[in-house]
Amino acid sequence: MTFLLRYYLVFFPLGLLGLFRWTMWLLRRIPAALYKPMRNDFRLPLSIVVPVYQEDPQIFAYAIESWLANNVDDIVLVIDATDDACIEVASRYPVRVVITDVPGKRDALRLGWENCTTPLVALVDSDTIWASDVAEEVCKPFADPRIGGVGTRQNVYNPKGFLPRINDIFLDYRYFDENAAQTVMGRAVSCLSGRTAIYRREILLDISDEFMNETFWGIPCMSGDDKRLTTLLLERGHLTYLQRTARVWSTFPSTWKVFYKQRLRWARNTWRSDLRALSKRWVWKHPFLAFTMLDKAMGGFTLFFSPTFMVIGLVERNWFLVGTLAAWWWISRSIKVLPHLRRRPQDFFIMPGYVLATFVMGAIKLNALLTIRKQRWLTRQVQVQNGQVVRTTVKAGN
Amino acid sequence: MAKARNGLRQALTTSAATAAVLGVLLIQAVWEAPATAGATTTAAAAASGGTTKYPSPTKIAKDLAHQKYLQQQRAAHASANAAKRAAEFARASRISQAVWISNGRPALLTVVGPTRVYIVRDGVLQLYLARPAGPLSVQWLAENLPDQWVSWPARGVARLNSALVVIDGSALTADSGDLSTLQLVDGAWIRVSRGSFALTGVTVTSYDPATGKALPPTDPKRPFIRAGRGATLTLDGVTASGLGNASGTDDSGITWGTGATGHATAVKVTGGYTGLRLSGSVAVALKQVTVTGSAKDGLVLVNDTGTTLAAVTADGNGGNGLRIGRGPRGRTVSGLVTSGNTGFGVAAENAAGVVIDKLTSSGDTAGGVDLTACTACTVSGATTTGDRFGAKIGRGSNGTIVTGGTFTGGDYGVFVSGQATGVTLNGITVNAARVYGVGISGHNVTLSGGAVASTGTGVRIGPGADTVVVSRVTVSGGNRAGITAGGTNVTVSHVKVQGGHVGIQVFLHAHNVLLDTDTVDDARDAIDLAQGTSAIRIVNPALFGFPHDGIANSSAGLSVTGGQLHGGGTAIETQSSMSLTGSQIDSVREGVHVARAVTLDAKRISILATKTGASIASGGQLVLDNSRVLAPIGIKGDVRYVGDNVVALPPFPWLGVVAIAAILLGFILEALHATRQPKRRPTRDVAPLHVHNVA
């Protein structure tokens, strides 16, 4: 009887929860498994717009060289007036440099695409290094005139240490699971990552004002530019597409402090964008997109059930439950990131760390929801004050 | 100068009483001679002065008669004085001799009386001195008595060469004014009888002139200090070393004897035979006292009344730290700290009503507390560490209570011997005992509350034990067992046993044992009942995580009622006939296993097993009455059904199957995805050379 009670009171709810989470995952994973990149010979002139602010000069130089290797039509670097080092680096290459003294990434992006003339504009982060065929690959989806924006597959640039490797797993999970499924199920990728996203310039000009004047609960938004651009595209009826054959690499934080701040900023952006989208009609025209938004929102909460059972098991010294749950975490998470483990099998051994990182991410998402109105970049010396994006004091040594 | 005066005085007054009388007569003769000569001279002077007027013959006759009268008066007076002095000397002799006789006839004796100080050699009074009023100091004795009795060998050092007795309300002091050390040579001692002796800030030590050091404890005449009836002995800031001998209990160190009182504050006693002894004393207060290195016990309390202890330490003594003997009820020893004593920290023998409170004992070789023939004694809040016995309740102890306290390390935490009765162990904590956490062999013993942890056996109830109750104790068993129960009339109830080879073992012909609502967790065999035991009952057991057997039974007639047996090997393995009523068995490999020629009567039981519900050897039988058995293999062997029974498969493990299916699906989807991807140039060919993450 006790066994049955335990079965129904503990294992059964835990199993139901697992079943639910796995069903949600399968609903993404099955279409993701059917994903194929676009294959054609379609090509349009392409410009690259790069807002530059306090970038590592070496990485910046690598990035410029990788963009030049793609033979794009134009490269526009919008560099902050205070960033002398990057201005000096840019001066060594055949690129256009636009100096701006207006703080904030959004204004730099707008300045960039307004300075371009090509039909396609790639908005790229200054630390993002391209493969030599990115320009060629990202043009292919635009053969479909409904496609307004295209995303690339991204990975961590030479990951070393725990956090960069964990971030590399998260990126593979995103591009082999969520974004791939969204591409297959309606060509509506929820967010074309700002590290490299290609848009039709005419659409950018069309949504420019809305992009620049985004507010959330009356407060101007500073970060989350990529999510905002993607949402505006989708809202206007354009489609977004993941072209996974286009590969880029970007740097990621290696300290927990920066990792926490970056994830907190992204989580706030996601909460704002998704909550706003789910309250509007257009998103329901993309039911799979709506489903993934809801799933992501719920996943933030259901994530805590499993550790709660683990704590109960530890307190009750129910080593069977503890052992089973720990083994299940390891195995199930490994299955969910199987595309990454095929690429880097040695990362199987850091899966326990990955599991713990997902719990930390869950806590960060909860924190982000509770502080959703805060507008701080957190990793840059800019923030919104009195409705304006302003520079904040640069700390000594930063 | 003082010593010179004393020498003269001694020369004048030595010898016997007869010699003294002769001396007085001689002095009278000397006195009368110049008196006569004076008279003659006066008459001559008067004559030579030219006085022409001669007195009349009548006048002369009258003067001569008067002079003769005066001479007679003087002679009578001198005779009376001599007689008086002789009487006084005789009285002093009687007094000193009486003291000498009553104090063991020492060769040299100094007697401090209320008005005089007497010195005696071999029982003969040598001298008596008038002494100043008020307390007399040892310094005064050293300055005024012959060196044979008391000497002043160095600045600040007084040496007592004789025995010394303080009598009749006299007060003797030794303080740190001019005195830093009081040395007592071999054969010297200090006794206080109806007087007082106050030592303040000085060092008192035995002294061997040959070595210049303290005398060894084997010396039969090693000095001691003893306060007798009506005496007051006070020690303040005193260091006493090398005192006491083996010749008599009251000569063993510093002793407050019968009727004596006083105190010791901030006192260090080292190297005594027995450090401090309170034998029949009244209201002696010991505060900040440290007794170390005694040959025998550090402190001894016998027949003492109103003793108080505060911050008393007994360390490294050859016997017990504190020994308590006979005495009135209600004696309390509180806050004692003992360590490194060869005997026990505290040993109480033939005592009654003793309370030992907040004892701290560590490294005492024999143990922390020993109670032998101690009636209604209480040990509360004791802390022992590394003692062989934390507490030992020995033979003849009756009504002993051990309450609270932590007993760590050693062989036995608390041990109740076979001849102890009526012992209560309440809320004790035993940690890391090597042999038994608690060993019980006595009668009418109760162990309740607390926690017991042992690397051997947690609680052992020996075969001679009778009427033992163990309740609400948490036991962590070690290599052997959590609880082993022998003896007769044993109840183990509401006990939690964690780990161990066997949780609860009933063995050695134990009879009438009740295991009531006990919990056993993670023991190899939760309960083991040996052959030869009888009248064993188990009520509401809660047995979890037993890798081997939940109940391994070889006891005929075992009765198990209620309870749950969860997770493990075989829930019930029985080699003898038994009954099982209303028990829940789940998550075990095998529900019950019945041996050959054995019958198991099972009523209203529930078995949920992962392999076999019940296995009955040939010749054995399971009587299943209104029960349920869920297992892949329900029942093997001879079973007789009574009433409604269910024998079926266990619930299908859907969750596990779904989980495995999900994992497989994950692999299948990945394979599907991989096969659908177009072939293209390797990333290595299109990535910049400095990019390594291109797999």
Image (cartoon, coloured by chain):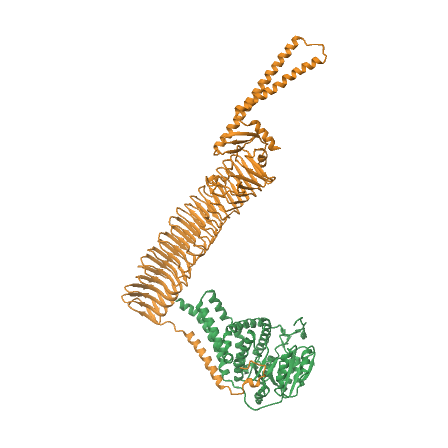
Residue B603 lies in what quarter of the image?
A: bottom left
| Rendered view: B157 above or below B679 | above
Q: Quadrant of the N terminus of chain A?
A: bottom left
Q: Is residue A373 left or right of residue A354?
A: right
Figure colour of chain A: green
Residue A244 in view in this figure: no
State the image coordinates of residue B34 (x, y, percent, origin top left). Answer: 63, 19
Q: Is residue B299 left or right of residue B57?
A: left
State the image coordinates of residue B165 (x, y, percent, origin top left). Answer: 52, 34
Q: Going by the picture, which residue comes out furthest to the top?
A: B57
Figure colour of chain B: orange
State the image coordinates of residue B591 (x, y, percent, origin top left). Answer: 35, 67
State the image coordinates of residue B415 (x, y, percent, origin top left). Answer: 41, 52
Q: Is residue B238 left or right of residue B618?
A: right
Q: Going by the picture, which residue comes out furthest to the bottom?
A: A41
Number of callouts in the render?
0
Q: Quadrant of the C terminus of chain A?
A: bottom right
Residue A50 in view in this figure: yes
| Rendered view: B99 above or below A72 | above
| Rendered view: B3 above or below B489 | above
- Residues B502 and A227: in front is B502
